[in-house]
Amino acid sequence: MKKVSGVIFDMDGLVFDTESVYSRQNIETSKKYNMTGYDADYYLSEVGLGEAAVYQKYLKDFKHVGQEDIDAFFEDSREAIWKEFNEQGAPLKPGIMELLTYLNDHDIPCVICSSNKRVAIDLLLEKANMTHLFKGIVSGDDVEHAKPNPEIVEKAVEMLGTKKDETVMLEDSLNGIRASYCAGVPVIMVPDLIAPDAEVEEKAFSVCPDLFSVLDFVKSV
């Protein structure tokens, strides 16, 4: 890349260390509903999916539980997560403030592009006093098809008003990388819970170990 004119940020696992919270709360709640096999490895299989896709996955993988209890699991786990976020917010990923500060100081617009619900995104950004650092937000509520469909990335680029080849998307999940790749937007993976594989190596513009390395890249172009 010769120039970075705009940056698209995934949220969960990229801006905030939320994936560990989701995993811990879901595993704990799953015990109440006899969802045998719901462990840390199982949680990894749903990282990057929209809520509707996760729900269908549960119905398929935990048929013995039944739809009523799956609904109750969703309600209980979301309530526990929401309570924790309301009380504590979520930990920031290392380097995020340094990166956002640099981008804002250099008038490079940033947007959030997350499959999460808008109310959750707003809460976490407000708790961290970060809302003003982003030009806008595209959430799972704003699209018909979640990642890996490119629709959400297309909307984020439109919001930025930048050329695709001068825009960078930052992602930690494979589905996010697939969405950006299909949208024709260069994507940098910053791994969180999931390590890069052969598909990531093929589709990502680059893999950076952390957001400090992303900042070094932005400074270099």
Image (cartoon, rainbow, N blue to C red):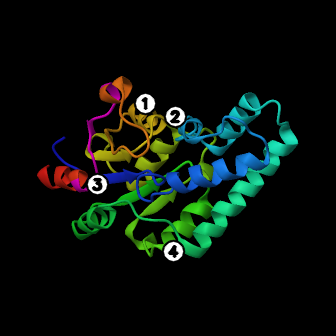
- Distance in Å between CA atoms under marks 2 and 4: 28 Å
Task: Look at the picture and state if 161 lies above or below 171.
Answer: below
Residue 204 image point, x, y percent: 32, 33
Where does label 1 land, which residue?
A: 182
Q: Which one is closest to the eye, mark 3 or mark 2?
A: 3
Range covered by the magenta-colored residues: 202-212
Label at residue 73: none
- Distance in Å between CA atoms under marks 1 and 4: 33 Å
Residue at (39% x, 45% y) in the render: 171
Q: Earlier in the sequence, mark 2 or mark 4?
A: 4
Mark 3, other Cα within 10 Å: few <14 / some 14–19 / many ≥20: many
- Distance in Å between CA atoms under marks 3 and 1: 23 Å
Could you say which is closer to the camera, residue 154 or residue 196? 196
Residue type at the position of mark 4: Lys
- Distance in Å between CA atoms under marks 2 and 1: 8 Å
Residue 133 image point, x, y percent: 38, 69
Residue type at the position of mark 2: Pro
Label at residue 127: 4
Q: Earlier in the sequence, mark 3 or mark 2?
A: 2
Q: Are the two marked residues, 3 and 2, in contact with CB atoms closer than 8 angstroms? A: no
Q: Are the two marked residues, 2 and 1, in contact with CB atoms closer than 8 angstroms? A: yes
Q: Secondary structure at mark 4?
A: helix
Q: Earlier in the sequence, mark 4 or mark 3?
A: 4
Residue at (51% x, 44% y) in the render: 152
